[in-house]
Image (cartoon, helix red, strand yellow):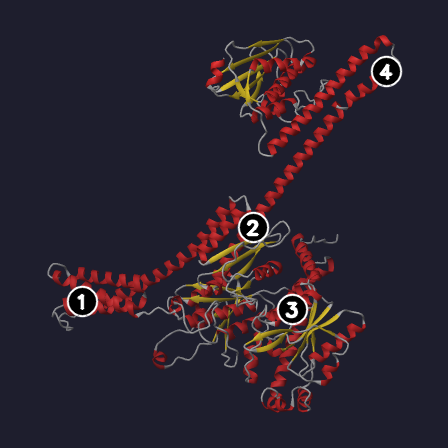
Amino acid sequence: MQDFMRPDPDALLAQLRSDEARAQRGKLRIYFGASAGVGKTWAMLSAAQRERAAGRDVLIGVVETHGRSETAALLAGLEALPLRELDYRGRTLAEFDLDAALTRKPAVLLVDELAHTNAPGSRHAKRWQDVQELLAAGIEVWSALNVKHLESLNGTVGAITGVRVHETVPDTVLDEADEVVLVDVTPDELTARLAAGKVYMPQQAERAAQNFFRKGNLIALREIALRRTAEHVEDDVRGWRVEQSGAGGHGRDLQAWNTSGAILACVGPHEGAAQTVRTAARLAGQLNVRWHAAYVETPRLQRLGAAERDRILAVLKLAEELGAVTAVLTGVDVAVELAAQAQRLNCATLVVGRAEPAGGWQRWWPSAALTRELARHAPGLDIVEVARAESSRRLAHARPGRRTDDSVDDTDRPRSRWPGYAFTAAISVGITLVVMPLSNVLELTNIVMLFLLGVVGAALWFGRGPAAVAALLNVAAFDYFFVSPRLSFAVSDVQYVLTFAVMLTVGLLVGQLTAGLRFAAGVSASRERRAQSLFELTRELSAALESMQVVELGTAAVEGHFGGRALVLVTDANDRLVMPAQSPDGFDGSVADWSFRQGQPAGLATATLAAQPWHYVPLRAPMRVRGVLALSPAQPRWLLIPEQAQQLETLARQIAIALERVHYVEVAQQAVVEMESERLRNALLGAISHDVRTPLTALIALAESLQTLPPGEHAEAARAIVSQARQLHALVSNLLDMARLESGIAGGAVNLRRDWQSVEEVLGSAIRAAEAALAGVHVQTVLPADLPLVEFDAVLIERVLVNLLENAAKYGAPPIAVTAQVTDAALVLTVRDHGPGLPAVVKGHEQTLFDKFTRGQAESATPGVGLGLAICKAVVNAHGGDVTASNAGDGGAEFVVTLPRRAPPVSMEAQL
């Protein structure tokens, strides 16, 4: 029997979503070469001419010919997009017009120089980011790229050529390209083209030949380009095999392509950390594995200056751009934290930078290398040591929101440690002065304890260094002032030497442990604050029922965590972002709208419009983007810290989920209302179809019989017609009354014409109006002789009594009794019959009888649509009263109407 393997439904769903996203996204073709002059632009324009001849809509966004006549000749016949002019420092720069290309939306768009840096003021800092937006809009893009511009190869290319390349492209751009066309020539041919002036102008060609275009450089770059292209082809083959592995049957054998073993790059505070990250990215690409980057902040590294901390953040941001998942760890031992992180992430390889050779006195200080410590704590992991690359580009250390002048905020200045040492010395002097008068009273052991207490206090307040100084000073003070001979460092008893050693050791140990606990407590407090803010926001959002509540809670939570100013922007019914009525300083609604439409962060601390003072995050919910979170933080550099950036993303995610939940709650409520309306409509149509058709049929039959009946019987037929017409009139009156009452209730209140009325008169009018329905049944009335006037709408209360009398006549048995009584606060009217009472099915929930289209007997020959009692309840509730139904003690049904009352005016009481 053939073994059949059922496909994984989650994998199929993910594949369908991936195919759908790929179908909507434009394709990217990159013409890839080893260096300038190999013919990438020429090959791209040649292919564009062929596509144009085939009838495709080809548009040139930007093409750099570099003065080459052969390349310029290929521009003939191709439509070109006008460049956008930007003013920068008194000069006019021509740049690619992204918005015009999105509006034009051609089938194929040529965007040369993929690694180009855009002029300040452009939407994106790099041209490859423009290309990403074009691809998201469904436009097919062709571009050109040299191997030296790949970010992971920046240090390698710099070491080979000695030239520092500043314009780079993340490797993921090349990896995600749909097509990579290798344009290759031999080094000798490229050198000949350079000499012939086909690469640069003659004055530039000679200088290039002596520097970058040396034959050894060209050979090495060609090898790297060929290998990089082969890796892309290998990725294509692997992707095809993975797709085939889910095809069932013969494709199951292809699953042997799966690989494992992630990479963890260890980011340090030294200058070569960027090269470590680039090497890890290249290894991960070659091995086709995921990779991570981590930086361990120890108490010593916590005291680094702002420039060093900004360099670390820049390296972490570079790792994110290259596809890594970054993290900032905290701990005392770097090796222990890195080994634990590698185990948590299931990483098989650690990539670390090569340490600088120790200089000066440090070469004589024994210290274990990081690689040895890692090997000791994680013996099962492979450790790769990366050499330093002096020719790689330096990362920009400018912090977001930093001013252009040389002034620096107080929070960015490294805190001086000298006050801590000064206070430590003061503590030692203070303890000495306090203890000296008590030296004849206290034992030396107790004095030692006091000095150790001072060491603990110094460690708790000022850290490790001051604690160590406190231990030395306290040992010296104890020896000089309290050990015989006093006021001398000489020791009469050799045993005191052991006391000094133990005291110094214990002081240093206690100080170090206390400082470590202080550092760990600070880290735990920071993590607790982040977790607490998330917990509080989640708890409060769970109770939010309106979008404005979510907006207020989300704004308060973000401002409480990051400080500064925050805005939560939501969409309207037309899926447009609603801007604030008064925009705060620096807020740009166009950037917020772009972030909403593209679903990507923008502004401060991003690669899109980084000069903006606000940071914009799309509120991405599981189904769609629900709005934008705009933040102007108190400390802009916090957005570069991975934990803080993840905290902001988590807060935005929670707000987006809450907005989506509220939206679907409103949708569900609307659906319930529509279902209820549909149910009432069906009930109304069902009732009318029966109760209206019956009297109409009878009227038609009686009218036709008048033509054949003898004249003496015409009167009987006329009476029957009148009876059926009254039934139809009563039915229509009930429907109209219910519609009017429902309309009044929906509008806020029923329009009542209150006046002081006589209950006897209203009851008498109701009995006369119900004569036809009563059909001669006698109505007993029990009214007190001193029944006062009551304020109500006489017409509506009369309608209530008529409906109750008709209900008693239909479903009850004579006699029908009506009683009235008053209390200080209410008028109580009771209508009862002596029939079988209320149906057994409503026992315990008698109030359902007052629902619309509800009848005591669902299947009955008695006409009616079930609106009489509903009208009674609506009228009584409009008066502020209540109506109830129950079975009387001696048989029959009893309906009690309670109306609120107040004492009549004095003049009216005098008339009575």
State which quadrant residue 280 falls in.
bottom right
Distance CA(mark 4)–CA(mark 1): 131 Å
- Give whichever of 603, 248 is nearer the camera: 603
Distance CA(mark 1)–CA(mark 2): 64 Å
Which residue was labeled with disc 1? Answer: 478
Q: Earlier in the sequence, mark 2 or mark 4?
A: 2
Q: Is residue 54 above or below residue 243?
A: below
Q: Nearer the viewer, mark 2 or mark 4?
A: 4
Distance CA(mark 3)–CA(mark 4): 85 Å
Q: Nearer the viewer, mark 2 or mark 3?
A: 3
Query: What kind of element bears circle 3?
Result: helix
Which residue was labeled with disc 3? Answer: 98
Which residue was labeled with disc 2? Answer: 657
State which quadrant residue 68 falls in.
bottom right
Q: Nearer the viewer, mark 3 or mark 4?
A: 4
- Type of residue at label 2? Ile
- Type of residue at label 1? Phe
Residue 354 can be seen in this image? yes
Question: Residue 204: x and y, percent?
Answer: 62, 89
Q: Is residue 890 above or below residue 269?
A: above
- Residue at point 77%, 21% (across, down): 694
Q: Is residue 450 left or right of residue 298?
A: left
- Type of residue at label 4? Ser
Question: Residue 653: x and y, percent?
Answer: 54, 54
Q: Earlier in the sequence, mark 3 or mark 1?
A: 3
- Give whichever of 267, 860 is nearer the camera: 860
Which residue was labeled with disc 4? Answer: 705
Q: Earlier in the sequence, mark 2 or mark 3?
A: 3
Q: Residues within 10 Å of mark 3 (few under 14, many from 20)?
A: many
